[in-house]
Image (cartoon, coloured by chain):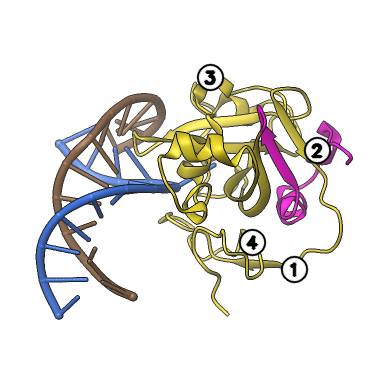
Chain colours: A yellow, B brown, C blue
Amino acid sequence: MPRLRKSFFSRSVHEVAPELIGATLLFRGAGGIIVEVEAYHHTDPAAHSYGGQTPRNAVMFGPPGYVYVYRSYGIHWCLNFVCEQAGSASAVLIRALAPTEGIATMHRRRRRADVRLLCSGPGRLTEALGITHAQNGLALDAPPFEVQARKGEFDVMAGPRIGITKAAELPWRYGLKSSRYLSKPFKV
DNA sequence: TATGAGATCAACT
DNA sequence: GTTGATCTCATAC
């Protein structure tokens, strides 16, 4: 299965984000199929990079194909893939996976019996995979990360993003239609 | 099913 | 001091 290289990410976030639906994300032998993402661009008021570079979001201002991890609400870690080019400060937030690999490990980390609650949300997914700020700035096309291109057709839906107050109406959330592992269902 | 509180931290006013 | 790209558990309907 072809592994996605950095060139895959050096395009508009709005092209990359929907194409990530159906791709497989693995981290140290745990992970699954990406079923939900959101796109953020530095011209977007909801993006962390909107107000300029800070120590926290510095990775977003670097080259594409790297991971940006930040702490959310003081509790969770959230995982992003940097896109476009150095300085464009755009990224895709990974919001949900359909678990396929290392499910037992993920159950142990999450202390939950329901597979639907393993990776169905940005904070849940990082806890299940064991991702923290220690991974901030790592490359996506080298261990411990592995991102595999999707194979076959996937029915991708778009809708408003979740949990934001600025630019909340922009339809930059993408998801795999009728997946049971979405953090929230898409409106029909 | 739906709303509300608590946990806890970095950026920003 | 307030807010946020969140999740869980408790309580209410």
Question: In front: mark 2 or mark 1?
Answer: 1
Q: Mark 4: few, some, or many residues within 10 Å (few <14, many ≥20)?
A: many
Residue highlighted by disc 4: A175
Question: In front: mark 2 or mark 3?
Answer: 3
Dot 3 or dot 1: first in sequence order is 3
Q: Chain of mark 1?
A: A
Q: Is residue A49 visible?
A: no
- Cα–Cα span, label 3 and label 4: 27 Å
Q: Which residues are magenta?
A: A1-29
- Cα–Cα span, label 2 and label 1: 23 Å
Where is residue A59? Give x, y as percent.
61, 26
Q: Nearer the viewer, residue A68 or A31?
A: A31
Dot 3 or dot 4: first in sequence order is 3
Does residue A153 sit above or below A90 in this rendering?
below
Does residue B2 sit above or below A59 in this rendering?
below
Where is residue A96? Give x, y as percent.
57, 51
